[in-house]
Image (tube, rainbow, N blue to C red):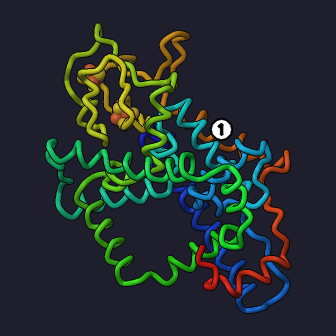
Amino acid sequence: MLKNSRLRNSIQVVFTLFVLYIGLKFVQFVNNYTSGQSPVLSRPAGVEGFLPISALVSLRAWLYTGVFDKIHPAGLVIFLAVLLISFLFKKSFCSWLCPIGTTSEGLAKAGEFFFGRTFHIPKFLDYPLRSLKYILFFFFFSSVFLIMSGPAAVGFINTPYNMIADVKMLQFFQNLSGTALLIVGLLAVLSLLFENFWCRYLCPYGALLGLVSILSPWKISRRRETCIKCGACTRACPNRIAVDKAQRVRSPECTGCLNCVNACPVPDTLRFTTPLAKLYLTPRKAAIAVLGAWLLIIAAAKLSGHWQTEITPQTYQALIPHAADFTH
Ligand code: SF4
Ligand code: SF4
C-alpha cells in the first residue's frame, strides 16, 4: 500500500508522463505535415490544455453566442474542468495533476538535495511578489472580458493563428530564443531555491484557480479540542500557510495537497471537510475525487462530441507548413 503522500506524488508523475506522451504524439503530428509524409497521423486533442488564453477567449465567445468552441473544444473542456475541480476541492488541480506544479515540486526536492534545504523569501517581499500572479491574471482577464468584444472573440477563434496556436506554441519551445532560454533557466534556478516559485508568484492560471477556490465547500479544518499545537501541519505546508493557527484554511494559496493532514500526529484533528454535511475526504478519497472528476468530465466531453476539433486535415495541410507566417 502506498503511503498517502506517495499516492499524490505517484498520480503527479503518471499524469506528467501522460502529458509528455501527448506532447510526443503532437510533435509527430506536426512533423507529418511539415515533411509531407503520409498517412496523416491523428492529433491528440489533449494538447489544447496548453492553450489557456485561447480557452479564455473561447469562454468569452461561448458566453456571447451560446455556441461551444469547435476549433479547440478540448481546450475549453479542460479549462472548465480545472475551474470546476478548483471550485470543489480547492486548488487541487495544481498539486495533484498540473505538470508544471509537478516539475516545480521536483525542482524544489532537487534543491533540497543539493543545498540541504529550500529558502524562504522574506515576508515583506513575499506579499508583493504573490500579487504578481493576480496582476498577470487581471491583465489577461481584462484583455479578454473587458477590452475584447464578443464578436471580436468569435472572430479570433476562427483566425488561422488560433487554429494552429498549438503548433505555434510547439515551434516556440522548439526554437527558444536566447532571452527565452535565459528566462526559463532563471525560473528553474529560482524553483530550486524557493519552493513553488512559479506557482506561488507568477502563474496567472493558479491566481484564477485560487480566486475560484475561495468558494470551495471542501477546506482544511482543524479541531481545536484535539490539536496539541505541535506545528507539524504548518511546517509541512508547501505554501507557508499557518495551518496550526486556523480553524478553517480559507487561503487562496491552499492547493489541497493534504501534506498537513498527512503530517498531523493526532488522528481526525485535521481534515479536508465541508462545514455543513461533515463530509470529509481522506487523502485516498481526495485522490479518487480529483482524478474521478477529471476523468468523468473528459469522458463526458468525448461522448457528447465536445472534444475533437472540426479542423480538417486539408486545412491543417494548408496552414501548418506556413505556421511562421501567421503572427496574430
Ligand atoms: S499543506 Fe494543507 S494548508 Fe497547505 S496547501 Fe496543502 S492542503 Fe493546503
Ligand atoms: S499537526 Fe495536528 S496537532 Fe499539530 S498543530 Fe497541526 S493540527 Fe494541531
| Residue at the spot of label 1 | 292
Is residue 108 visible in this depiction of the protein? yes
Say if 116 sits above or below 277 in the image.
Answer: below
- On the image, the x and y values in percent for residue 313 come to 84, 76
Task: Report whether residue 6 is seen.
Answer: no
Badge 1: residue crowd in 10 Å (few <14, some 14–19, many ≥20): few
Q: State the residue at coordinates (50%, 26%).
A: 216
Residue 270 placement (x, y as % from top left)? 37, 21
Is residue 261 depicted above or below 139 in this figure?
above
- Residue 289 falls in which quadrant of the image? top right
Figure quadrant of the C terminus: bottom right
Q: Position of residue 61 (x, y in %)?
A: 70, 49
Depth check: give the residue in front, 82 or 263. 82
Q: Residue at x 61, y 48 (%)?
A: 79
Report the residue that reaches farthest toward the top.
225
The disc labelled 1 sits on which kind of residue?
Answer: Gly
Ligand 1 lies in quarter: top left
Nearest the viewer among 81 and 291 is 81
What element does badge 1 sit on?
helix
Q: Position of residue 40 (x, y in %)?
A: 82, 81
Q: Is residue 169 left or right of residue 209?
A: right
